[in-house]
Every structure is written in C-alpha cells, then in structure tokens.
C-alpha cells in the first residue's frame, strides 16, 4: 500500500530567518520536483513570512499586539540572516551575492513553492500569541493547530523542524 | 504489526530558548492528546529546563562549573526568547501577551506534559559538559546517552530536533 | 526486506555553531557505533566546518566572495557557541571545560566520524552562494544538491535538521 501512495515531506518552519527560510523552500520545492507531496507548517517567527506587506482591511488590535506586530518582519523580503546580519549589512550583502549569481530570491522561491503545490499551513495558536489575524496573511493559506500538523505528518516520509 | 503498536513522537530539545521550548511542549502534549507515545531528550542548553530553582542538596563543584551554572537559566521560568529578547523586555512582553490571552505558560505546559506521560530524558554527556548533576534536576527524569536516544527513536514515527 | 537492510541516519547540518556541530557529530558517530549507516548533508553555515584552514591551491574570487569568506569560520576549531559566546570568552570556557573533562573536541569528533564511515555531503548551491569552491574543502567530501539529500534521506530511519 505504501508503494502506491506519493511520498511526502512535511516541514515545520519555526524560524523567521532568511537563511533558514531559504533552506525550507529549497527543500519543499525540491521535494515537489521529485514528485513528492510537500507541506510547510508555519509557526512562531515563521508566521511572519506569511504576512502581507500592506493590509487594506482594517484590523482592530490592542496596543501591545500593534507594537509587537510593528517590530516583526512582514513577508519574505523583510527577513534577516540568523548570523552575520551586522545591522542589516550582512543580509544586504547576501542578497546582492544571490542576485549576482542568479540565485532565486526568497520571494520568488515562495511563489514557486505555491505554484508547485506546496501546502502552506499557518499555526493558529502562534497567530493568536502574536496577535496576527487571518486578514493579515497572504492568500491560499490553510489555518491549523498542532493536531493538524500531527495528522499531516504522521504519514509523511521526511519531517524536519527548521 | 505496526498497526497494533502506539504511534510515537521523539523530540530532541537542544535549545534553551523560551519560544523553542514552547514549541517542543506543545508538540509533545499534542501527541499524547492524540494517543501517541511521546518523549523528549533534553540535551545541551535544553538541560537548563530541567534544573531546579533551589537546590537543597549541597553539590560540590569546581569554580568554572559554578560560574557557568550561575550564568545559565534554571527551569522554565528563566528562559528567554531566541529573538527580540531586547535585554529581557521582549520576553516580558511575550509572557504578558500569553497571560492576557489565557495561553498556558511554559511552566504549566511542562507539568501538563509530565502528567500526560511524556517521558523526559536528560543527556548525561551534556550534563557532564555543563557540570550539572542529577541532584540539581527536577524529579522523574531518566538519564540517558546518545545510544538511549537512538534506541528510543528508531521505532518512533515523528522525530524532530528543536 | 526492511529487516535485511541497515538502519540509517541522515542529518542536515545547517548550523555553523560549535554546540550544534557537536550534537550532529555525537549523533552520527553514535549511529555508526550502533551499526547504522550515517550521512551528514552540510548546508549554509554548516559548509564552514568543511573548509580547510590553509588553502595551497590559489582560488580566484571576486571582492565580495573574498570578504564574506574571510568573515566566516574555517574548519571546526574556528566555531563559536550559539549562546553565551560573550565575544569568544564563553566558547573558550566551554572548550576548556571539555578538555578538563576529557571530552572529545569537535576536531577529533569529525575525524572519528570520517573514520567510522559517516558520509559527508556538501551542498553545492550553498557553496555557490557563499563563494566557496571544492578546492577549499577538506578531502573525501561528496558534492550534492537538494535532490541528493532527498535521495539519501527517503529511505533513512532517522532524519534531523540541525
């Protein structure tokens, strides 16, 4: 039975760092290229990758949620390196290097992943903790709990926490 | 045969950060709620979560072990965020947010996990490296080596390194 | 059939931190000790572990690759702790503690891993991104892409992202 079913990769993207997000998307799109199913469960800082740059829908928030939200990155272009960020300089340098070498940016990688059918699931308890609501996230995201993750992952072949 | 045995989650908690510890305990207790077996192998900075706040038993240590021990957190309430800690301010803010939203604190989550039967294993070689002895850890902890982890994990269904 | 084949551990070492690298090599050599196959896929900051201290072969690089390369560690002895580095002091202290307690250094652990047959694979797209070429890496390294990792890992029993 195992043989008839598609192989599957299930990632938790906990990190909101540029370098780790790159790793997660390279792995996910790599998996779909090889014919595998693939999903990413975005939790904690990883939720920031799913935030829209500009939100047209007004969202009511308390002061502390607003403050916290304003300090966190919005979407893939805001992310920084986990190491050697050096006040943003290292991140800029890395982005320039990637561009010069025709390497795909995180922004584009995310779109490629969506087009390739990688399923994006946002962790609802992380969203609540960070005061982020569904309206602030990009389209085509599923919402889910830890139970959702476990159900998605129990029959997966490769599972990683990034 | 596989069908008759309970499914199992085996986590390595390497990190001693508040946010990553929250993720580990949410996953473990989530797994037990779904009827899975669950164990956490605490290694390196993760060992700090198992340290008692106050130790009544006198423990003889050399100077450097004492110094190192005094600089590391003792138990779940001492942990800091891996990002946006801002000299402790971000961590305080996050704890306030969690409280305001009736989210379970790490302290309580740890107790829930123990009550739910999540097995806690402390890595002995990490304990040795950090100069921490069994008497300084909370009760109901098993001690184990890398071999213990591998034996626990080889038949697990979900394994993550956090 | 599963029973006749050797069990296998497949790690991604993304991190270039001393503590995480120690964990990766303890796990890998532990796995081989128990008769398992074992491989490590070095990616992003993890590539730095494979860099030779001194490179006799002249390698032509552009300015930014040279600069970036000069800021990153070269080999296991250059690595720092992910926490409590304190400008290098914490890392020195940890190395002293490990030596005093006769714990194996990362340098020696890496050699033990190679001798025990742990397969080292360097991620080519990370190498390109960081401007590091094959000549700068230690001997007996395989080069591979995400597809290589996936092929190595799909039939592995334990897979972790470190």
Image (cartoon, coloured by chain):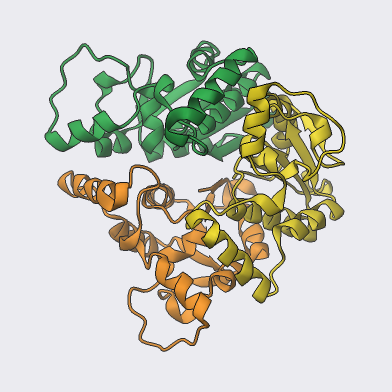
Chain colours: A orange, B yellow, C green
Position of A125 compared to A110: left or right? Answer: right
Residue C63's image quarter?
top left
Compare residues C158 and B142 and report the one nearer the observer: B142
Q: Is residue C49 above or below residue A78?
A: above
Rendered location of residue A118, percent (x, y): 44, 60
Residue at 75%, 56% (x, y): give it: B107
Q: In this view, does A80 lie above or below C89?
A: below
Rendered location of residue C42, percent (x, y): 42, 31
Residue at 41%, 27% (x, y): give it: C121
Residue at 44%, 65% (x, y): give it: A48
Residue B30's image quarter?
bottom right
Does residue A14 appear in this view? no
Rendered location of residue A22, percent (x, y): 37, 50
Q: Quadrant of the image for the N terminus of chain C? A: top right
Rendered location of residue B126, percent (x, y): 67, 28
Does residue B128 appear in this view? yes
Compare residues B43 and A159 and report the one nearer the observer: B43
Position of A146 compared to A143: left or right? Answer: right
Q: In this view, does A63 lie above or below B51?
A: below
């Amino acid at each position: 039975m195992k043989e008839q079913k598609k192989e599957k990769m299930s990632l938790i993207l906990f990190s909101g760092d540029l370098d780790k997000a790159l790793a997660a998307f390279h792995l996910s799109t790599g998996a779909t290229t090889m014919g595998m199913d693939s999903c990413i469960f975005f939790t904690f800082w990883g939720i920031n990758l799913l935030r829209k740059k500009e939100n047209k829908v007004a969202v009511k928030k308390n002061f502390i949620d607003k403050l916290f939200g304003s300090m966190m990155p919005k979407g893939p272009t805001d992310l920084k390196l986990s190491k050697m960020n050096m006040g943003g300089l290292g991140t800029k340098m890395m982005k320039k290097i990637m561009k010069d070498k025709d390497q795909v940016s995180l922004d584009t990688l995310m779109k490629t992943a969506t087009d390739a059918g990688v399923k994006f699931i946002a962790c609802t308890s992380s969203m609540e903790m960070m005061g982020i609501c569904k309206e602030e996230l990009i389209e085509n995201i599923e919402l889910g709990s830890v139970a959702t993750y476990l159900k998605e992952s129990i029959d997966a072949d490769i599972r990683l926490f990034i």
